[in-house]
Amino acid sequence: MAGCQAMMTSTTSIMISSASLVALLLLGDDKTLATLPVTAVVTGTALATIPASLFMKKAGRKAGFIFGALLGIMGAVIASLSIYMGSFIGFTLGVLLVGTYTAFGNYYRFAAIDVAGPAFRSKAVSYVMAGGLIAGFLGPQIASHSKDLFLPFTYLGPYLAIIPLGLLVVLMISFVKIPSPKMEEQAAEARPLLEIISQPTAVLAILSAMIGYAGMSFVMTATPLAMIGCGLTPTDSFNVISWHVVAMYGPSFFTGSLIARYGEFKIIFIGAVLGMLCVAVALSGLAISHFWVALVLLGVSWNFMFIGGTTLLATTYRPSETAKVQGFNDFMVFGTVATASLSAGILQQTFGWDVVNMTVLPFFAVVAGIALFKIFGRRRSEVMAEGAE
């Protein structure tokens, strides 16, 4: 499962680090829609999250993961042909289809929770997400070293490389045994979705994942454009994105242990504070070091907020409610990410890097405030319980 996560995230990082640059080559004089392909990736993910969850509820996780990888391969073929033909619309449609693959693959972490059980869910999520660490090096390096392989069709190489990455996922999943949900659990009474997501803990869990992911995507999507605009090179951009992805997934080796020791609320709070620190660094200068430090802080922020939110969400629903809650959560997360990635390009091209960063600051602050409130609320409850004893 961690290997599949690595291949899927490598695919995503290839597109994140190069899709807007491909768009610059395919578009005419008006570059406003340069981040539209990145938006298409997360839009495809958002649109497919609920269907993917329902599909796997009927057909099983394994069949869903294989089907999703095949969709990704098909999308890579369309994107590659579109680069060859010089079609911006075709390229956008191709990466949108690859985004649907990501929707299926994002359930790797929930499949780990299903297998590990309550006692080990935070570590299970962390270890699966740690597979993305490989992608931090693999994806951007594939994009960097293969972009000129098929000149004059720049960036054709990275999108052809997505095809074997998808085939590796199909191969690995074929050897994985994922138990099917018990029929009695699926048939048990389920509460209405609104009742479940109205719980204060569920609200924080969903907000943490939403803002952690959307804030990360918002700043990361604008980063290659901002760096090129500052006179830095595409190679500089690939390297910064590479270390950003490492920072996203590297902490996964210990995030689960931190959650088990300190609790989800504290880890989410720290993640939101790191997001605010990212903004402070980004606003302090335009040297490559500023981009590098800001994107590393942003990566760790995403890790704590996303894994913390995922683990916390798992405490709010019953087995019979799994599909609809997980589907709703990921639809909200990636719907927000799609909006963020599109608006990031428009804001970057129209108002600049500073406005991009200032825009995300209040959202990180909101999550930090709610998490802090929950931390003190839990501490007060514990003190009252001790007094009652």
Image: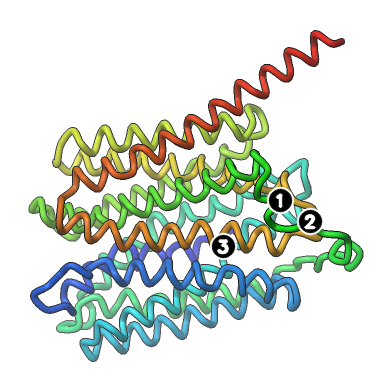
Relative to 80, residue 104 above or below: above
- Residue 45 percent across, percent down from the top left: 49, 69
User: Amino acid under label 1?
Assistant: Ile
Q: Are marks 2 and 1 in contact (CB under 8 Å)?
A: yes
**Around disc 1, counting alpha carbons within 10 Å, would you say few (fewer than 14), some (14 to 19), or many (20 or more)?**
some
Q: Most extreme residue toward the right, as rendered? A: 184
Relative to 328, residue 300 above or below: above
Q: In the rendered structure, find residue 191 and report the number of the disc placed on it.
A: 2
Q: Tag 2, which secondary structure? A: loop
In front: label 3 or label 1: 1
In this view of the protein, which residue sits in the foreground, 94 or 384?
384
Residue shown at 17%/43% (left/top)? 288
Residue linked to disc 3: 106
User: Amino acid under label 3?
Assistant: Asn
User: Amino acid under label 2?
Assistant: Arg
Nearer-N-terminus badge (3/1): 3
Q: In the rendered structure, find residue 196 and report the number of the disc placed on it.
A: 1
In this view of the protein, which residue sits in the foreground, 251 or 51?
51
Instruction: Using residue 277 as the reference point, say whether residue 234 is left or right of it.
Output: left
Residue shown at 33%/78% (left/top)? 92
Instruction: Using residue 84 as the reference point, say whether residue 140 is left or right of it.
Output: right
- Residue 273 percent across, percent down from the top left: 42, 31
Residue shown at 17%/71% (left/top)? 24
Q: Tag 3, which secondary structure? A: loop
